[in-house]
Amino acid sequence: MSDELVHRTLPSPNFNERALPITMVVLHYTEMKPVDTALDRLCDPGAEVSAHYLISEEGEVTLLVDEDKRAWHAGQSYWRGHKDVNSASIGIELDHPGHALGYRGFAEAQIDALIPLLHRILHRYDIPRANVVGHSDVAPARKSDPGELFPWDRLAEYGLCLPRPDKLELGDPFDNDGAFYLALERFGYDITDGHAAVRAFQRRWRPERIDGQIDGQVRAILFQLLLDRDRGVSR
């Protein structure tokens, strides 16, 4: 069956059955070059890693694992109560050198291919925008992808992820760091390593400064995100 959004299929043996319904999308970068190196690894039985899709920098979309199967992309991870993120998510790898090989912005053709694919996935499974996350969001102590240069704002323009709050209504609402960490956990993050969780939050929501420090701006952003969610305006 032809698929206008998928250019080729390269079946990976690295999958098993899901134990949960699909409620998330996790975005990654490959941190490998050239793209064939990443594809070889994602299809290597010995590597025991995979993803549902890989999108090259030229915008070619490769299907590796059928959406109804559990691909092995997130590893040890957590988001909003889910410890088996692989079972609950679709994983999309973006061909990119990553922080290890020369971090840079993402190719326009790649994001142009991601947007319609992501739109279809979200509508197919009724996935909330708040559950379109980066690998660093679900594994803050281990991962930093897709990183601070990923264009979340472009996805938000199409309603494919939550936008960064542009209005911070109540300023700095938390009395102490403990209250902030509890709120961060309530939003969805694993706070076992608090410093790493703050860095992950900053990488997603305040990428211009990632220092792991809890300051007034990150407290205000988190509070606004929770306020919008409780009002039902940020599903």
Image (cartoon, rainbow, N blue to C red):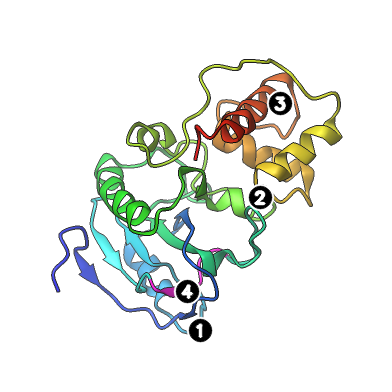
Q: Which residue is mark 4?
A: 70
Q: From the viewer's perspective, is the residue at label 2 or at label 3 nearer?
A: 3
Pointers 4 and 3 in contact (C-beta within 8 Å) = no
Q: Quadrant of the N terminus?
A: bottom left
Location of residue 69 with respect to 31 vertically, above or below: below
Distance from disc 3 to disc 1, alpha carbons, whole Å, reads 43 Å
Inspect the image, locate mark 1, and give the three-letter code of the amino acid beneath it.
Gly
Within 10 Å of disc 4 (Cα), the crowding (few <14, some 14-19, many 20+) is many
> Nearer the N terminus, badge 4 or badge 3?
4
Distance from disc 2 to disc 3, alpha carbons, whole Å, reads 18 Å
Within 10 Å of disc 2 (Cα), the crowding (few <14, some 14-19, many 20+) is many
Inspect the image, locate mark 2, and give the three-letter code of the amino acid beneath it.
Pro
> Nearer the N terminus, badge 3 or badge 1?
1
Q: Residue at x 59, y 49 (%)?
A: 136
Q: Which residue is mark 3?
A: 219
Report how many numbered discs are placed on residues in the image. Answer: 4
Relative to 208, 56 lies left or right: left
Instruction: Name the one closer to the observer, 165 or 8.
Output: 165
* The magenta segment: 68-74
As helix, strand or loop, the secondary structure at mark 1 comes to loop
Q: Which residue is mark 2?
A: 140
Q: Residue at x 46, y 31 (%)?
A: 163
Instruction: Name the one closer to the observer, 188 or 8.
Output: 188
Residue 33 x/y as whole percent? 38, 58
Q: Which residue is mark 1?
A: 46
Distance from disc 2 to disc 1, alpha carbons, whole Å, reads 25 Å
